[in-house]
Amino acid sequence: MGTFLNATNSVLPLFLIIILGIVLTRLKVTNRQWIEILNKYALWIGFPALVIYSLMHLKLSGSSYSNLILINSAYIVFCILLAYPIAKIAGFNNQMKQTLFLILCFGNVAYLGIPVLQNTLGESILPVAAIISAVYVFWLFTLAIILVEIHNPQKSNIPKLLLNLLKNPLLISVFIGLAIVFFQVKIPIPVEKTIKLFSDSVTAVVLFSLGIFLGLQEIGKIKEWGQVFFFVILTMIILPATLYLLIKLFNFEDSNFCATILDSAMPLGLTSYVLSVQYNLRVKFVARMIVLATLLSMVIIPLWLVVLK
């Protein structure tokens, strides 16, 4: 019990920010326009600064991130392709199958995952968190979107998709950070401090934005949440537990093991919601899954921290 309380206390400040966003939205202090502004700041300034600052202090000598990238990639690809048997067994239509490509493994590894890893595992985990986030972004905007496009009744535009991937600020910031380390670029102290200021600001901004988003969602009827609850449990407990057992079984554990499992158990991210709107998929289902998953993560994440000790 003590371990669970300690784990809860380590992530509670993050969820208090989300709750504040929900409360202020319900009180009509904030509105949907705040989300767009805060998310643009996070996407184009805050998170790139956090990723670059984290990677600037990365020590390449003696460390290999190949296993980290391969294990996370294998897990993501498996989860994406799992949409086919699930859709067939459950008898889902094409629209729901497309939606599954976006929800089965794309947890909030950036907006929530990075702050959680930082709070629970310390500052030293930030380069790992940045790399994992980049891996998730890569597969989301390549394989997952390509499959959505393939099953789209309208004509696909793969070149435009690849161009959007190359313009993604998170991936660009990863390349910039790695280039600074690889070429041993000396960043002037005032510039480094400026990057750190932006880096320190992003956690509260994105969590508050997430709270506003949750506060804007309609509750609906209880019976409408059954399917949502099933997929939340699948994506936050069953699939991460499968990954956990496989890593243990094949002895792939390393210093990044905890970060990999925690990120695999994150609640569904907002990017999946944005993409579901763009492709006219099950928008209400995705929104409700984000709401329920984020609320349950206040219990599920501490439980995973207990498991991971």
Image (tube, helix red, strand yellow):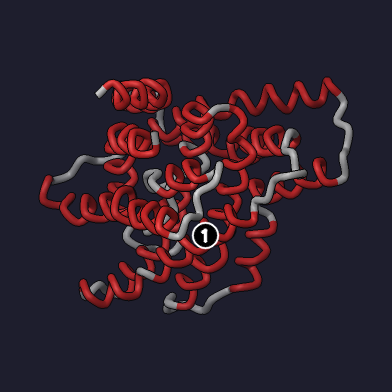
Residue 54, image x and y in percent? 68, 34
Pick the residue in front: 163 or 197.
197
Does 92 sit left or right of 30 as displayed?
A: left
Q: Is residue 240 visible?
A: yes
Q: Is residue 277 visible?
A: no
Using the image, determine if residue 62 lies above or below residue 70: above
Does 277 sit left or right of 45 as displayed?
A: left
Quadrant containing the N terminus is top left
The amino acid type of the residue labelled 1 equals: Leu
Label 1, on which residue? 140
Residue sitting at 52 percent across and 71 percent down? 146
Using the image, determine if residue 206 lies above or below residue 246: above
Assign a secondary structure to mark 1. Answer: helix
Using the image, determine if residue 270 lies above or below residue 216: below
Residue 233, image x and y in percent? 26, 50
Q: Quadrant of residue 297?
A: top left
